[in-house]
Amino acid sequence: MDTSHTLNENLSIARTLLRPGEAELPPMVERTIRFLTSVGIWFQLSRNHDSRSCRDAAHRRRRLGHEGIPLWDELKSSFCKFVNAAGDTEPIVIHCRADRILNQQKLAEALDVSSAPERLSAEEIAQFGMEYGLVNPFNVTEPYILDPAFLEARVKQIFDDDAARSIGAPGTMMTNAGSLSWAVEFFPSSLAEAIEAQVVSVADPDPEESNSLWGVRVSRPIGIITGNPPESGSALWNHINAHIRSLLGPR
């Protein structure tokens, strides 16, 4: 959505994505739209088939007219709790790219606590109006009041530093917009700033994703020295482009 759009304009645009038989926007989707509009960052809504896992969602996301995005462009969010320095139990949402796994030691160090956070139960997540597969950065931004173990405050959020920067083109990431069939696209640096997230290294590469194409995941510049005539350099460049296209396929 254009950052100049009003809330009513963004809600109207979102309603054009309603499917036959759907009369209203899901409440959590509307809440997502309200938050993103209020902080004034660019975002784009889309629809996909229901999905809960990050891998399945990445295969189903729609971006730039195509179905499917790289796994590293899907945001993985974990809703946890930890005991802070004052001895109080505090909820926290931790975000990283879907091709990464959380490092418990790094998390404990980032929070300056002796033990790493533990995941909330399904019942605890439900108190925030969410469920597994629908945790996102947008719907925990308002102050919360839970049982006496939790204080009234905004939920703390951490962005892994790798997820707080753009990778490749178009440089956006995606996650659920509050419903299994609704997705939202955004620029990670803008979102991290908007939710006032702590940005720190808390995740490591997932060994199961070691075969990912490094040429897209980690960009590296190259230089071409041309011979005489200069067309020899152009020929080499064309061969390189053709090889990269074959590696990337539909991406």
Image (cartoon, rainbow, N blue to C red):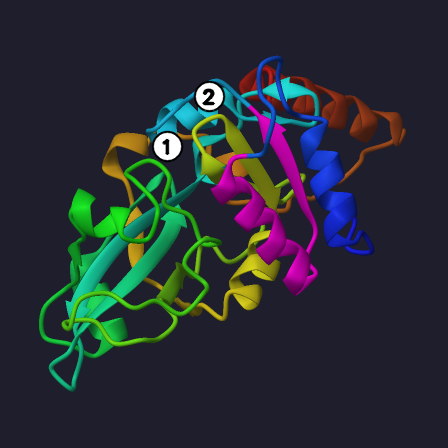
Q: Nearer the viewer, residue 149 or 163?
A: 149
Indicate the amino acid at tag 1.
Cys
Report which quarter residue 236 is drawn in. Answer: top right
Q: Nearer the viewer, residue 128 or 225?
A: 128
Residue 161 among magenta residues:
no
Q: Secondary structure at mark 2?
A: helix
Q: Is residue 167 visible?
A: no
Q: Nearer the viewer, residue 147 or 44?
A: 147
Residue 32 among magenta residues:
yes
Indicate the amino acid at tag 2.
His
Residue at the spot x=15%, y=73% of the render? 148
User: Quadrant where the C terminus lies?
Assistant: top right
> Furthest residue to the front?
23
Can you tell which mark lies on residue 54?
A: 1
Q: Residues within 10 Å of mark 2 (few under 14, many from 20)?
A: some
- Percent position of residue 220, x then y: 57, 46
Q: Is residue 182 left or right of residue 140?
A: right
Q: Nearer the viewer, residue 164 or 152?
A: 152
- Percent position of residue 215, x then y: 53, 36
User: Quadrant where the N terminus lies?
Assistant: top right
Q: How many marks?
A: 2
Residue at the spot x=56%, y=58% of the render? 191
Sequence-earlier tag: 2 or 1: 1
Q: In this rendering, is residue 185 above or below 83? A: above
Residue at the spot x=90%, y=29% of the render? 229
Span shown in magenta: 26-47
Residue at the spot x=27%, y=52% of the render? 127
Q: Secondary structure at mark 1?
A: helix
Q: In this rendering, is residue 152 above or below 6? A: below
Q: Is residue 167 left or right of residue 98?
A: right
